[in-house]
Every structure is written in C-alpha cells, then in structure tokens.
C-alpha cells in the first residue's frame, strides 16, 4: 500500500536507503535533513511530496518529488529507493508511475531526474530509459572527479 510519509518513517527510510548499496553515507545523512525539512516546512510551504510503499508493516520503498522553483510546472524526482531484497520485482516502476500520476494531477508538465554517470549506476540509467525517460544531458565530473551527472526528463502533462 502506498501512503504519505510520516516523521516516524524516517529511521526506516534511512536504513532502507543505506541498505540499497547505491547511496554513500553522506547522501544518507543528506536524506535525513531532507526528510526533517520535509516534515517541518517543505511539505506545507513548498509542495514537496513523499510517499512510502508499505506491506505488512514494513516499508519496502519510497519516492520523494517536488516542484522546481522558477519553472513552468517542472517537477524534480529527489529520491526513489527500494529495499535491496525487493529490487528487480517492479516496485521501483510502480513508485515512479505513482509519482508521475501524482504530479500530473497537480498540473505538472515535465519530470526531471538526476543520477550518476558511473558504471555502478548503469542499472539506474536503464531503469529511467525503460520507463520512457529521455537522456537529456550529461555533466562530467559533477558529483566528483570521474562521477558525472546524467539528467533524464519525461513529459507528464501539457495543459495547466
């Protein structure tokens, strides 16, 4: 079942994220601040959205997305993660489709995703291409020397 994230979900989301094998400790620390800000202000003041997928009391994945300021209905996918033992079974695709539908109902026009260009993130880049995203840009050495940023986009709506 998918539901809005609560402050009580934060420890599970941090543990799930750390356990995926994709995120560095600094990124998990950053997520903690993002979630704290989400519950304190960003949800209500800036329209950020965070949802968790839970089954039998266990959080299996989550998605966090937000409108991008100074754009015409562009949204950013900030975070999406699925528990390591649940990966490869379609849950990530369901979370992504949910986020797309969610922002579409809010009048979104474009969804933007950023990820790493390293070999380790090749499955992530294939995931976005599989779900209809276009590889829009690449910025070498963005995150660190040898670790660039790949940007993907998908049109999710047209009208206001």
Image (cartoon, grey):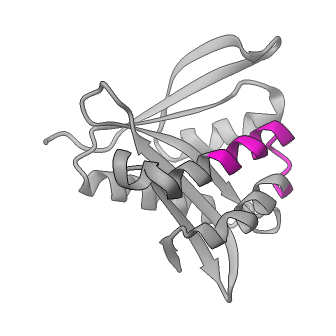
Going 83% across and 53% down the picture, which residue do you hit?
A: 18
Q: Quadrant of residue 129?
A: top right
Is residue 22 within the magenta segment?
A: yes
Is residue 87 within the magenta segment?
A: no
Q: Quadrant of residue 60?
A: bottom right
Residue 99 visible in the shown view: yes
Which residues, given as a range, are shown in magenta? 19-33
Image quarter hosting the C terminus: top left
Give the answer, above or below, for where 143 lies relative to 20: above
Name of the residue lying farthest toward the bottom: 56
**Residue 83 pos. (x, y %):** 76, 64
Q: Quadrant of residue 144?
A: top right
Give the answer, above or below, for where 92 lies relative to 160: below
Going 55% across and 70% down the picture, which residue do you hit?
A: 6
**Residue 26 pos. (x, y %):** 81, 37
**Residue 45 pos. (x, y %):** 35, 48
Give the answer, above or below, for where 90 lies relative to 1: above
Name of the residue lying farthest toward the left: 160
Going 33% across and 52% down the picture, which residue do you hit?
A: 103
Q: Is residue 44 left or right of residue 134?
A: left
Q: Nearer the viewer, residue 88 or 95?
A: 95
**Residue 143 pos. (x, y %):** 73, 20
Dominant SS of magenta comes to helix
Total count of labels: 0
Going 55% across and 49% down the picture, which residue do you hit?
A: 37
Residue 90 visible in the shown view: no
Q: Is residue 85 left or right of residue 88?
A: right
């Amino acid at each position: 079942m998918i539901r809005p994230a609560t402050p009580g979900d934060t420890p599970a989301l941090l543990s799930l994220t750390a356990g995926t094998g994709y995120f560095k400790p600094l990124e998990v620390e950053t997520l903690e601040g993002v979630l704290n800000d989400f519950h304190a202000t960003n949800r209500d003041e800036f329209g950020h959205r965070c949802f968790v997928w839970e089954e039998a009391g266990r959080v299996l994945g989550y998605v966090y997305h937000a409108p991008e300021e100074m754009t015409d209905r562009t949204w950013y996918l900030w975070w999406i993660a699925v528990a390591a033992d649940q990966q490869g079974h379609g849950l990530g695709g369901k979370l992504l489709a949910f986020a797309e539908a969610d922002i579409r109902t809010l009048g979104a026009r474009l969804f933007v995703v950023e990820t790493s260009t390293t070999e380790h993130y090749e499955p992530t880049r294939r995931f976005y291409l599989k779900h209809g995203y276009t590889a829009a840009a690449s910025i070498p050495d963005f995150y660190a020397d040898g670790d660039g940023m790949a940007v993907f986009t998908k049109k999710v709506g047209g009208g206001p």
